[in-house]
């Protein structure tokens, strides 16, 4: 898309007859910007997949109204609570503006994105991590803005139940230091490093999105 290169990967666990609620999405905006989304609905099965589909298209609709990432999360949270579905969801929404190289992001129950410089140095982006969608009706989510440099990469990722382990650190530090071990331009190697660093078992879903500023 304009001013940005995007790679995405969803690894569904090998469960015959089972569908899941992980997804990633990227949508161009009329002003030349891009909306980036990565989500994870809890549990699995058809109802989880249905909730993921509703959230995916709701985010696109609110993005078309020029809402900020935090406002989008607040809106879809209200929608999910009003639907009274049995699921919660973790979601990160980001908006990238190529003219300024500004990345504005907000997270609901999701880990913060990781930024890698052109030299490979990784940093976990600092910003508020709100509650998962569907837990509190009046939850308001906040934006965090960072200006990227040419050559920067930003990693968005999730791994189902591994989320709690990531918050405790450990594997997250290995993800942050990925540039010391792999070529960050090799997205397949990045996904393999992510799965290995976080000790994500084969029966867990993995979703990753790597955004590169040329």
Image (cartoon, grey):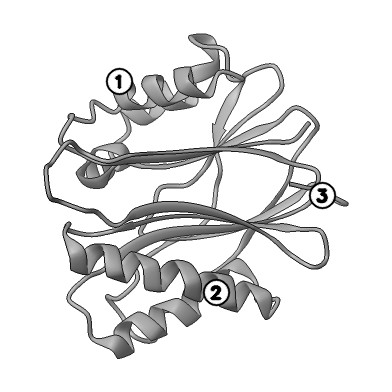
CA neighbours of label 1 inside 10 A, class few (<14), some (14 to 19), many (20+) = some
CA neighbours of label 2 inside 10 A, class few (<14), some (14 to 19), many (20+) = many
Q: Which residue is label 2 attached to?
A: 72
Where is residue 129? Give x, y as percent.
43, 58
Q: Which residue is label 3 attached to?
A: 98
Residue 61 versus residue 53 in the image, above or below? below
Distance in Å between CA atoms under marks 3 and 2:
20 Å
Q: Which residue is label 1 attached to?
A: 196
Q: Which of marks 3 and 2 is nearer the N terminus?
A: 2
Distance in Å between CA atoms under marks 3 and 1:
32 Å
Q: Residue at x 34, y 65 (%)?
A: 52
Work out which residue is located at the far right of the displayed protein and give it. 99
Where is residue 37? Give x, y as percent.
52, 56
Along the line of sight, the residue nearer the viewer: 3 or 181: 3
Along the line of sight, the residue nearer the viewer: 197 or 23: 23
Numbered tag placed on residue 79 in the rendering: none
Q: SS at mark 1?
A: helix
- Is there a contact, CB below 8 Å, between mark 1 and mark 2? no
Q: Which residue is drawn at 34% across and 80% down?
A: 80
Q: SS at mark 2?
A: helix
Where is residue 90? Give x, y as percent.
35, 60
Q: Residue at x 42, y 60 (%)?
A: 91
Residue 124 versus residue 147 in the image, above or below? above
Q: Residue at x 80, y 43 (%)?
A: 3
Q: Which of marks 1 and 2 is nearer the N terminus?
A: 2
Along the line of sight, the residue nearer the viewer: 71 or 167: 71
Where is residue 19? Give x, y as percent.
21, 53
């Amino acid at each position: 898309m304009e001013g940005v290169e995007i790679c995405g990967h969803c690894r569904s666990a090998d469960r015959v007859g089972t569908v899941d609620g992980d997804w990633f999405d990227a949508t161009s905006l009329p002003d030349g910007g891009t909306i980036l989304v990565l989500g994870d609905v809890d549990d699995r099965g058809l109802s989880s997949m249905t909730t993921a589909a509703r959230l995916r298209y709701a985010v696109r609709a609110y993005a078309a109204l020029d809402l900020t990432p935090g406002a989008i999360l607040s809106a879809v949270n209200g929608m999910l609570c009003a639907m009274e579905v049995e699921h919660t969801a973790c979601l990160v929404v980001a908006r990238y503006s190529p003219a300024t190289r500004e990345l504005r992001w907000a997270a609901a129950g999701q880990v913060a994105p990781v930024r890698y410089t052109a030299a490979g140095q990784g940093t976990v982006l600092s910003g508020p991590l709100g509650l998962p969608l569907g837990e509190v009706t009046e939850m308001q989510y906040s934006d965090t803005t960072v200006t990227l440099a040419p050559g920067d990469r930003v990693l968005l990722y999730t791994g189902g139940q591994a989320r709690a382990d990531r918050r405790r650190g450990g594997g997250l530090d290995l993800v942050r230091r990925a540039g010391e071990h792999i070529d960050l331009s090799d997205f397949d190697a990045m996904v393999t490093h992510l799965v290995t660093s976080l000790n994500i078992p084969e029966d867990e879903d993995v979703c990753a999105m790597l955004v590169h500023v040329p």
